[in-house]
Image: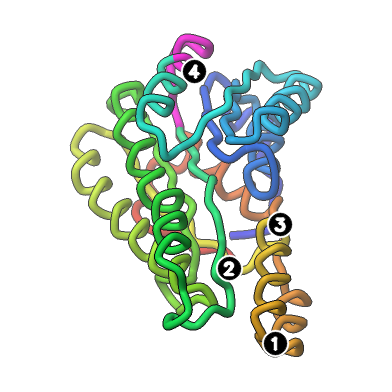
Amino acid sequence: MTGVAPAAGLLTGRRVVVIGGASGIGLATVRAAAAAGAAVAVLDADADGAAGAAAQARAAGASACAHAVDVTRETQVADVLDAVAADLGGIDAVLHVAGVMSGQGTDVTDLPLELWQRVIEVNLTGPFLVAKHAVRHLADGHGVLVLVGSKAGVLTGSGSVPYGASKGGLHGLALTLARQLGPRGIRVHTLCPGDIDTPLMRRSLDEARANGTDGAQVARIEAALGRPEDVASVLTLLAAPASAGIAGTVYTG
């Protein structure tokens, strides 16, 4: 499921929230959703980046707003989602792309507890808080929640102990939410990409090198990195009513 741009009009009339929309997969998703006709809210810890992404969406002809948010702060998450619902007149789909990747190449015996806690907080507690406070805005019968995980922690291990654990946990969170929210007509997915060429991934590979990971192995990963736009096209499709028949976990290259 990669390589195809979303059809114009696929998201016409849909109000889509992209969390982590300032860069990488999130920014590509903002662009794709806007091109598909959605009204887009861009949320990110990087306020300037979120504003820039929203400006790109408006330049493409979409209605768009931006809000800064720390997904680990419950009050912020609740307040921002309330504000977005007011800005857009409701929310039809929440695409949670935000995350951190740290500890690449660090042996478990050398892993600081503080690093473990930070990755788990952002990558697992954050999506939980977003789900908790997004649900009251997602309309029964056609709401969509997509949590972006990874093949790491689901199909394979990871070069980072906390990252692999957080993404495995996020997968379990989404499966449980799907079971709980499905009877209300709210569709929940985990989207699990492979290695994608994003600023986050590039920084992670630099960290792996610095922590002693074999340079040839890192080079092989770099040579095979996928495109953010390909993941964004799948996210855009999942946000659309056209995907009503899709259930559960979705994998991309």
Q: Label 4 amino acid? A: Val
Q: Is residue 240 above or below residue 175?
A: above
Q: Residue at x 40, y 65 (%)?
A: 113
Taking the image as shown, residue 126 lies to the left or right of residue 211, namely left
Q: Residue at x 58, y 35 (%)?
A: 45
Res 159 quadrant in image: bottom right
**Is residue 90 within the magenta segment?**
yes
Disc 3 from disc 4: Cα separation = 26 Å
Res 252 quadrant in image: bottom right
Residue marked by disc 1: 217
The spot of residue 253 in percent (x, y) is 60, 68
Q: Label 3 amino acid? A: Thr
Disc 2 from disc 1: Cα separation = 16 Å
Disc 2 packing (10 Å; few <14; some 14–19; many ≥20): some
Say if mark 3 contacts mark 1, CB within 8 Å: no
Task: Pick the residue in front: 39 or 118.
Answer: 118
Disc 3 packing (10 Å; few <14; some 14–19; many ≥20): some
Q: Residue at x 58, y 27 (%)?
A: 68
Disc sitting over residue 58 in the figure: none
Residue marked by disc 2: 194
Residue marked by disc 3: 198
Q: Secondary structure at mark 3?
A: loop
Counting labels gives 4
Q: Label 2 amino acid? A: Gly
Q: Secondary structure at mark 4?
A: helix
Q: Secondary structure at mark 1?
A: helix
Taking the image as shown, residue 224 lies to the left or right of residue 166, namely right
Task: Pick the residue in front: 99 or 114.
Answer: 114
The spot of residue 204 in percent (x, y) is 65, 66
Q: Secondary structure at mark 2?
A: loop
Disc sitting over residue 84 in the figure: 4
Task: Pick the residue in front: 194 or 230.
Answer: 194
